[in-house]
Image: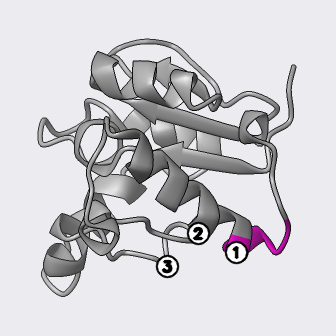
Amino acid sequence: MTRHAAYVFDLDGAVRDFGPGDAAPAIEAALGLPAGHVSTTAFRSDLLLPTITGRQGFVFDAVLNSADFGVVKPDSRAYTAAHAVIEADVGRELGRGEVWFTDDRAENVTAAREFAWHAELFTLGRKWALPGA
């Protein structure tokens, strides 16, 4: 199984799902987080604004927000901008195949694959684990 240097999750459809208990358990299990951690953290009153604006960096190593890039997925420029931020965060150049990405929208997964990231469509209820985890 491939070991990746970066794992990128779509916030709205994969990490922060508004149906309680839908997406969070799979993410928590894959990352070794305690049950309920994602929704408890995401909906704390002092964290709600950072969560809905994608600025909740303490749960993840970094948060990438398309508003900062001025372009949104599935535009290839969004992946180019995100890749540059990931490289800066990691502190080295990364091959595109070193990044794993998931999103609940097929067009975004297709665009990420065309960008040469490893990408998987996130679907609720699917049993999955992070590659190399």
Estimate the spatial distance between the alpha carbons at disc 3 and disc 2, rounded to whole Å: 17 Å
Q: How many marks?
A: 3
User: Could you tell me if residue 26 is visible in this image?
Assistant: no
Residue 31, position in %: x, y? 62, 46
- Residue 85's tag is 2
Can you identify the residue that label 3 sits on?
58
Judge by depth and name the residue closer to the eye, 92 or 61: 92
- Give the extent of the magenta segment: 88-92
**Mark 3: amino acid:** Phe
CB contact under 8 Å: marks 2 and 1: yes
Relative to 126, does residue 133 appear above or below in the rendering? below
Name the residue furthest bottom.
Answer: 46
Three-letter code, disc 2: Val
Q: Which residue is located at x 78 percent, y 40 percent?
A: 98
Sequence-earlier tag: 1 or 3: 3
Q: Which mark is residue 88?
A: 1
Tell me if residue 114 can be seen: yes
Give left or right: position of 124 versus 82. Answer: left
Vertical side of 64 occupied by 79: above or below = above
Height in image: 125 above or below 49? Answer: above
Q: Does 74 appear in magenta?
A: no
Q: Quadrant of residue 68?
A: bottom left
**Residue 18 at x, y = what percent?**
12, 43
> Alpha-carbon neighbours of circle 2 within 10 Å: few (<14), some, or many (≥20)?
some
Q: Amino acid at mark 1?
A: Ala
Alpha carbons under labels 1 and 3: distance apart: 18 Å
- Quarter occupied by the N terminus: top right
Say whether marks 1 and 3 touch (CB < 8 Å). Answer: no
Q: Secondary structure at mark 3?
A: loop
Name the residue: 80% across, 53% down. Answer: 94
The percent coordinates of residue 95 (x first, y second) are 81, 44
